[in-house]
Amino acid sequence: MQVFELHKFGLDGLIRSDRPIPTPGYGEVLVKLKAASLNYRDLLIIKGLYNPNLPLPLIPLSDGVGEVVEIGEKVTKVQTGDRVAGIFMQNWLSGHLTQKAAKSALGGEMNGVLAEYVVFPEDGLVAIPPHLTDEEAATLPCAGVTAWNALIEGGLKPGDTVLTLGTGGVSLFALQFAQMAGARIIVTSSSDEKLVKVKELGAFAGINYKTNPDWEKEVLALTNKVGVDYVVEVGGAGTLAKSLKAVRFGGNISLIGVLAGTQARVNPLLAVMKGVSIRGIYVGSKAMFAAMNKAIAHHKIHPIVDRTFPVTDIFAALKYLESGSHFGKISLIF
Ligand SMILES: NC(=O)c1ccc[n+]([C@@H]2O[C@H](COP(=O)([O-])OP(=O)(O)OC[C@H]3O[C@@H](n4cnc5c(N)ncnc54)[C@H](OP(=O)(O)O)[C@@H]3O)[C@@H](O)[C@H]2O)c1
């Protein structure tokens, strides 16, 4: 089988090789991959910017879906022919995040899904919503579950207002889940064209954060000077100070990403004086993934896939992700 392994950090360290198809052991399942999707994290990992101490060689990518083609002894929860996705953290099934679970993320601490066949423990898989294509379903494990955890597990209610930053994978899932929950959505983007698209998807308002660097003032103006109930904070240190101004008193900020950098001066007192709840989000559990899939199936939600590349074009796909010109998700087809 074909597999891509990272032998040294950097795009040129990703090497395609031939390996024998693995055999599932006790309680394990062999999955023939059909599609995968890219996350910003994959780019950071490959470049050595995520955790330069990750042991190499490593098979990258966390998000993949496929068909169960062989089951090991004593497997009871899946059968051959099932369409499944790997869960992001193989050891986070339910409850709160633990250190053990945090060390079981695919394509990082553990080998990922950039391979034609992958063996998973049977508990490391969920069934995918039947109405989705493979390239749509492949977007769910990281970006989908993260947005679900931030908003739905975070207690979003109908009538709330949500602010999402940018139009990448997590942010557009947040838009879709917020809409499903009856919330109102404000989106920022560097592109007026993308802002037109988010309005077509149902966003209440869009703000260009490049031409309007004081976007937090615009958010306040759009909310009668009250601020939003939830911020899906994918920017990190570079945007947090503005998010703290854009959120309402007693509101919620989900700390998720680092798109705007990891170092900046932020005054935490504003969070204290406004009684803001700040919650760190690290994807989510298998139970959250299953709950999300149920809602996606009921509401017939289709993830926003910008482009699909053949897996052999992984380098072009990663460069496209790096360019930031995508809208939503980038998938790979095997
Ligand atoms: N904690 C977790 O569990 C978790 C899970 C998933 C992702 N993440 C993190 O969350 C972030 C987003 O991930 P993703 O996969 O959704 O990324 P992505 O799809 O690559 O999103 C990229 C988009 O973000 C927007 N963006 C870039 N710089 C920005 C800035 N300074 N301010 C506001 N928006 C900016 C841009 O949108 P426009 O083109 O519209 O400007 C860009 O197209 C990453 O840092 C990722 O590592 C964390």
Image (cartoon, rainbow, N blue to C red):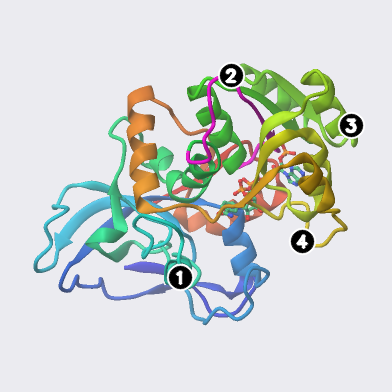
Instruction: Identify the disc placed on residue 12.
Output: none
Rounded to the nearest whole Å, what is the CA distance between mark 3 and mark 4? 22 Å
Q: Quadrant of residue 307?
A: top right
In the rendered image, residue 158 lying in the magenta stretch gets the answer yes
The residue at the point 77 percent across, 61 percent down is 262
Rounded to the nearest whole Å, what is the CA distance between mark 2 and mark 3? 26 Å
Magenta-drawn stretch, dominant element (helix, strand or loop): loop
Task: Give the x, y percent position of residue 288.
Answer: 39, 46
Q: On the image, numbered disc 2 is attached to which residue? A: 159
Q: On the image, numbered disc 1 is attached to which residue? A: 59
Residue 11 seen in the figure? no
Q: On the image, numbered disc 4 is attached to which residue? A: 262
The residue at the point 64 percent across, 77 percent down is 52
Within 10 Å of the Cα at label 2, are there few (<14), some (14-19), or many (20+) other Cα atoms?
few
Query: Contact (CB < 8 A) between labels 4 and 1?
Result: no
The magenta stretch is 153-168
Q: Is residue 39 above or below residue 113?
A: above
Rounded to the nearest whole Å, what is the CA distance between mark 1 and mark 2? 43 Å
Query: Contact (CB < 8 A) between labels 2 and 4?
Result: no
- Nearer-N-terminus badge (1/3): 1
**Secondary structure under the numbered disc 4 in the rendered image:** loop
Residue 170 seen in the figure? yes
- Nearer-N-terminus badge (2/4): 2
**At label 1, which amino acid type do we have?**
Ile
Q: Residue furthest left?
A: 74
- Nearer-N-terminus badge (2/3): 2
Query: Contact (CB < 8 A) between labels 3 and 4?
Result: no
Q: On the image, numbered disc 3 is attached to which residue? A: 212
Rounded to the nearest whole Å, what is the CA distance between mark 1 and mark 3? 40 Å
Q: Nearer the viewer, mark 2 or mark 4?
A: 2
Task: Give the x, y percent position of residue 256.
Answer: 63, 51
